[in-house]
Amino acid sequence: MSLMSANSSAGGLLTRAERLTSRIAALSHYRPRMAKAAETPHLIAENRKARFDYFIEERFEAGLALQGWEVKAMRAGRAQLKEAYVYLRGGEAFLIGAHLSPLPTTSTHITADPVRTRKLLLHHSELQRLIGAVERRGYTLVPLELYWKNGRAKLQLGLAKGKKQHDKRAVEKERDWQRDKARLLRRG
């Protein structure tokens, strides 16, 4: 006895969900929609110098409050984090010194400031944690990467301690040794 005949003999009333499932089952070519795969972040700009100058202990992801021309410039890959830093003021975080060079086709009624201060969008609990680490424990907030995630611009922040000169030399020495070791292993 089929589903339709069993329900019709029991009063003949099918719920809307039962009607839909029976219709879908009748369609042999039906395939349920797959959920969209999470979009992988596309890198816009990277601050390589930060990894050389600091020990990065923890990473945070922050959104950015941007203007329209800035988004267009970022999509064109015209962003730079080389001399940027993060400043905490009044319970908020700001990105200072990041350079977004405007496109030549930017709107004529706007004066584009390529190095303007941009507000970072973080949760309150993350902000409180960062404020505590920076003010009490002497950490520094360093912008590491600027990337797209699900169509939105994100900034990866690093909670960092500064390296001394001898630390930088040790890191460079270790990197050189790893490169030489890889070369020797390829030959042998």
Image (cartoon, rainbow, N blue to C red):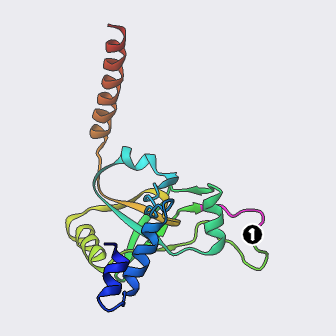
The x and y percentages for residue 143 are 42, 59
The x and y percentages for residue 72 are 65, 65
The x and y percentages for residue 56 are 30, 52
Q: Residue at x 43, y 46 (%)?
A: 49
Is any atom of residue 75 visible in this view? yes
Which residue lies under the disc numbered 1?
106
Above or below for 119 versus 141: below
Q: How many marks?
A: 1
Give the amino acid type for the residue marked by disc 1 in the picture.
Thr
Residue 103 among magenta residues: yes
| Residue 52 vs residue 41, the one in the foreground | 41
Q: Residue at x 37, y 61 (%)?
A: 157
| Residue 173 vs residue 148, the one in the foreground | 148
Q: Work out which quarter of the rendered image holds the N terminus and state it.
A: bottom left
Secondary structure under badge 1? loop
Above or below for 137 versus 43: below
Residue 75 among magenta residues: no
Farthest residue to the top: give it.
188
Report the side of 140 relative to 26 (left or right).
left
Above or below for 1 versus 77: below
Q: Residue at x 71, y 75 (%)?
A: 111
Dot 1 surroundings within 10 Å: few (below 14), some, or many (20 or more)?
some
The x and y percentages for residue 184 are 33, 12
Q: Work out which quarter of the rendered image holds the C terminus and state it.
A: top left
Magenta stretch in the rendered image: 100-106
- Dominant SS of magenta comes to loop
Q: Residue at x 37, y 16 (%)?
A: 183
